[in-house]
Image (cartoon, rainbow, N blue to C red):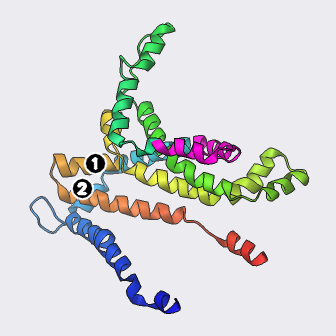
Amino acid sequence: MRNNKNNPFTLVPYYLWIALFVIAPIILVVYYSLLDLNGNFTFANYQNFFTGVYLKMTLSSFWYAFLITVFSLLVSYPTAYLITKTKQKQLWLILIIIPSWINLLLKTYAFIGIFGMSGPINAFLKTIGIPEQQILFTDASFVFVAVYIFIPFMILPIFNALDKLNPALIYASRDLGASKLTTFRRVILPLTMNGVKSGIQAVFIPSLSLFMITRLIAGNRVVTLGTAIEQQFLVTQNWGMGSTIAVFLILFMFIIMLLTGQKEKGASQNGKAK
């Protein structure tokens, strides 16, 4: 068994996979980012990215990704906590996961019908005497749909962290006179922070590159990095600029992963204490 583990050839498939499907695509994107419309080598694309239009678009992407992540966290943490207290944990988890199996385009079109002028929400507003509202093609509808889509990816890591939490620590905190709020702030939240960080990664990073929801739900009122990449590749046919935006998007994702990286020092210390 030791010989198999120490055999470097067992890692060859892994290295090939990383080289072909991670490193090679990134190199290709970087290569195209250094080309202009005529295929000539240039740094103009990177200079253009730091103009007002693209910087404003980048800030807008981060702002909407921040809103989506915050609202997802505010809904997911108490939901995950309540699930850990129920007897049918697995059943509730399956009910939360099932919507993520449905095609994203189908869910988006479903919300178009729900938020439309003749949809059920406006029909309800009419029954209570409120005139029809333009709910679709607004920032609020975009954030709501995005939160709905990403909530399962935030709940699962937080649930795993809460489920693994030793209840004796909570009982000890209460026995020592700590209030529920203090117990949550000083015991529960710090010990489940790795789950929160994983959830933030799973929501914030893909939120930066959303493009289909912005088209169908926000009606192009919201422009993200993903929308800009799609426009550069499919509309203007400027692959160089689209690749440049993709390069910065990859850098932003890498920085976010570093900032939200998990630290297992506490776990290792607990293991030594045992």
Q: Is residue 215 above or below residue 50?
A: above
Q: Which residues are magenta?
A: 74-98
Q: Position of residue 115 (x, y in %)?
A: 40, 24
Q: Are marks 2 and 1 in contact (CB under 8 Å)?
A: yes
Determine whether, in the image, residue 111 is placed left or right of residue 220: right
Res 104 quadrant in image: top left
Task: Identify residue type, mark 1.
Answer: Ala
Mark 2 lies on residue:
242
Q: Say if the magenta span includes residue 193.
A: no
| Residue that sits furthest to the right in the current view | 176
Task: Identify residue type, mark 2.
Answer: Gly
Determine whether, in the image, residue 35 is placed left or right of residue 18: left
Which one is earlier in the sequence, the residue at label 2 or at label 1?
Answer: 1
Q: Is residue 183 above or below residue 113?
A: below
Image point (46%, 64%), residue name: 255
| Residue that sits furthest to the left in the current view | 38
Residue 221 appears in the picture as rendered: no
Q: Position of residue 109 (x, y in %)?
A: 33, 32
* Secondary structure found at label 1: helix
